[in-house]
Amino acid sequence: MADEFGGDIPVGPFALIGDDSIGRGIVTTLEGHRSPAVLMRGHGVFTVGASAKAAVKAAVMCEDVARTIHIARQGGPVERLPQADIDALHHRYQNAYGQ
């Protein structure tokens, strides 16, 4: 989660389908977050990226993180990493890993 999303994946509000409410909710929720993914209440995951490939990667990673966290929680509470470690992991993944 730290690598790809830079912290928790934010949760956005519920919005009715039929106008631009979902899009506005996604944009508002992602403001100030490093995450390319948002979980919209009552809908599921939406992702953004510099390309369609990057957005799809973020969606796949989001599903993988959800599965991993679910399995980890079966063993008990999951301890959060210190923010400094999250920041360092995110920076490395975004700027050095696989470059």
Image (spheres, helix red, strand yellow):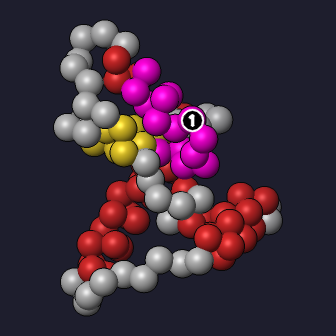
The magenta stretch spans residue 25: yes
Give the residue at x 65% y 35%.
Answer: 50
The magenta stretch spans residue 29: yes
Q: Within the image, what quadrant is residue 53 found in?
A: top right
Classify residue 54 as left or right of residue 58: right
Classify residue 19 as left or right of residue 34: left
> Which residue is under mark 1?
31
Magenta stretch?
24-37
Specify whether residue 89 is in view. no
Amino acid type, label 1: Glu
Q: How many marks?
A: 1
Q: Position of residue 46 (x, y in %)?
A: 39, 38
In the picture shown, does residue 81 fall above or below 28? below
Give the residue at x 36% y 45%.
Answer: 11
Q: Nearer the viewer, residue 39 or 29?
A: 29
Q: Which SS class for mark 1?
A: loop
Give the residue at x 57% y 35%.
Answer: 31
Q: Within the image, what quadrant is residue 4 found in?
A: bottom right
Q: Where is residue 52 in the image (x, y as percent from the top left)?
A: 54, 34
Q: Nearer the viewer, residue 75 or 99?
A: 75
Q: Residue furthest bottom?
A: 75
Give the residue at x 60% y 41%.
Answer: 32
The quarter in which the C terminus is drawn is: bottom right
In the picture shown, does residue 25 fall above or below 54? above
Q: Position of residue 35 (x, y in %)?
A: 54, 49
